[in-house]
Image (cartoon, helix red, strand yellow):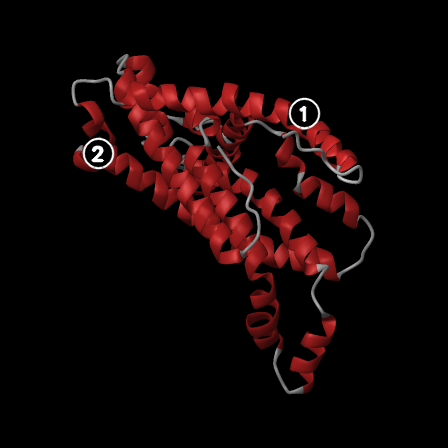
Amino acid sequence: MKTVLPASSRPVAASQAVWLWFAVPGVTLFCAFWLLPMVRLVGVGASGPQGAMAYLAVLTNRHYAASLFSTLALSAVVTLATLAISVFVGLFLQRNRFAGQSVLLAMLTFPLAFPGVVVGFMVIMLAGRQGIIGAVSNWLVGESVVFAYSLSGLFLGYLYFSIPRVILTVVAAAEKLDPSLEEAARSLGARPWQVLLHVVLPALLPALMSSGAICFATSVGAFGTAFTLATNIDVLPMTIYNEFTGYANFATAASLSIVLGVITWAVLALARSLTGSGVAAAA
C-alpha cells in the first residue's frame, strides 16, 4: 500500500532535502582533510616495531616524557600570564574612552596577522645575540643577556601572539557585564579589588576559560616560532619534527602527533563542558 504524504508536509520534506545538500561541502571537507588523514595517521603510528604500544612511548621514553612535560608546563605558564595581562588591559580598554583608543586596540591585536616564523624573528631581534636587550645589557654591565633561543624566548613569543586573542574576548565579554552589580557591591562597602575579585572576574570566568583553553591548545601545538628559535628548546612539536625529518621515524612521529592532538582535544572538551559554551577547535 503506497503512503501519500499530506500536502502540507510535502513542502517541509522538500525543504529539508534541499538543506541536506548544503551539508555536502562540509562533510566532504571533513572526510578529506580530517577524518581520512587522521585514520591514516593512527595506522602509521601503530605500524612501527612497537605496534600500538608506540602510543605509550611518550610516557615510557624519558626524552619524550621530558619534551611533553616542557610543552605542557610552558603552555600553562603562557596561558596564565596571557589571562592576567589580558584581563587588566581588556577591562581598561572597555571602560575608558580616550583619543587613539581604536589605534591602540588595533596595535595590540596586530600580532594576529603575523605567522609564527615572523614572531620568532622578532624575539631574536629583541633577545637574540644581536638583539636590543643584549646591546643594552652589554652597555650597562659589559655582558650581553641572550635568552631568545631558550624556553624563555619561546615563552615571550607565545605570549606575544596569545595576548591579542584573549584581549578581544575580554573586551567583548566586559561589554556585556551588568554595571548595577558593581554599583551594588560598591554601595555595600566593597573596595575596588573586592569588586574585581568577587563580581567582575566571576562574570568573566566563562569567557576566560574558553579563551584560555584555546590559548593553551595553540601554545601546545605551535611550531613556527619554536622552529625559528630552536637551539636549546625541547618541546613536543620540535621532537615530532626531528623524528620525522631527521630520523625518518614515521611511526614515532605519528604516535606523538596523535598523543599531542588528544591532549589538545581533551583541554578544549573540558573547557566546553565547564563553560557550557562552544570552544573553537584548535589544531
Nearest to viewer (mark 1 / mark 2): 1
Quadrant of the rendering where the N terminus is positioned: top right
Q: Is residue 139 visible?
A: no
> Which of these two is toward me, 36 or 281?
36
Count of marks, rendered view: 2
Q: Position of residue 49 (x, y in %)?
A: 16, 18
Q: Which residue is painted at 35% across and 38% down in the image?
A: 71
Residue shown at the point (29%, 41%) measured from the top left: 69
Q: Residues within 10 Å of mark 1 (few under 14, many from 20)?
A: few
Q: Nearer the viewer, residue 56 or 91?
A: 56
Callout 1, which amino acid?
Trp
Amino acid type shown at disc 2: Leu
> Residue 56: which numbered mark, if any?
2
Residue 272 x/y as whole percent: 50, 50
Residue 19 lies, in percent from the top left, at 70, 31
Residue farthest to the right? 99
Q: Residue furthest bottom?
A: 188
Spatial CA distance of label 1 from label 2 is 42 Å
Q: Is residue 21 left or right of residue 62?
A: right
Q: Which secondary structure, mark 2?
A: helix
The front one of 279 and 193 is 279
Q: Is residue 149 visible?
A: yes
Q: Residue drawn 69% across and 53% down?
A: 172
For disc 2, the neighbor class at 10 Å (few under 14, some 14 to 19, many from 20) is some
Compared across the picture, whether 54 is left or right of 177 comes to left
Residue 11's x, y, as percent? 78, 34
Which mark is on residue 223? Answer: none
Query: Does residue 1 sit above or below 140 in this rendering?
Result: above
Residue at figure coordinates x 48%, y 29% from the top left: 124
Q: Which residue is identified by label 1?
A: 21
User: Looking at the image, which is closer to me, 34 or 190?
Assistant: 34
Question: Of marks 1 and 2, which one's residue comes earlier in the chain?
Answer: 1
